[in-house]
Image (cartoon, helix red, strand yellow):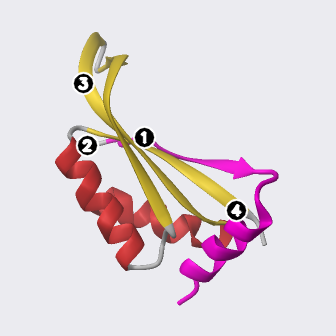
Amino acid sequence: MEFRFIYITAGSQAEARKIATTLVEERLAGCANIIPGMRSIYRWEGKIEEAEETVLIAKTVKDRVPALIARVRELHSYDCPCVVSLVVEDGNLEYLGWLDAQTTT
């Protein structure tokens, strides 16, 4: 089984919580971490912008990634949300087994 951490940024803690809860309820992710208080500086439509955001890390298996990304895009308030998949190479096998079981429908 291949595992992924999905890095997502959200405009608020409430939005991150809504997305995280939906992903876990729908078994697209086994767990999600919400990290508030991130400051982002980025270029958008030709201007440098700065905003406070919330980081959301969803933990899942590789075959759930496309559906997870699609669901985040449906739920997210941004026109172009940051949703990227990061490969998990190694880890606690007991935890990874639990994660696999949580993402099985």
Q: Residue at x 49, y 68 (%)?
A: 29
User: Three-letter amino acid code at disc 2?
Assistant: Tyr
Labels 3 and 1: the sequence-earlier one: 3
Q: Could you give the CA–CA distance between mark 2 and mark 4, rounded to whole angstroms?
A: 26 Å
Q: Is residue 93 visible?
A: yes
- Asked if marks 2 and 1 touch (Cβ < 8 Å), the reply is yes
Labels 4 and 3: the sequence-earlier one: 4
Q: Residue at x 21, y 50 (%)?
A: 15
Q: Check residue 96 for magenta coloring.
A: yes
The residue beneath circle 3 is: 52
Query: Is 22 placed above or below 75 here?
Result: below
Q: Could you give the CA–CA distance between mark 4 and mark 3, rounded to whole angstroms?
A: 29 Å
User: Three-letter amino acid code at disc 1?
Assistant: Cys
In-front residue for pair 64/1: 1
Using the image, tell me which numbered label, if any, was put on residue 78: 2
Front label number (1 vs 4): 4
Disc 4 packing (10 Å; few <14; some 14–19; many ≥20)? many
Task: State the extent of the magenta-drawn residues as a range.
Answer: 80-105
Q: Dot 1 lies on which element?
A: loop
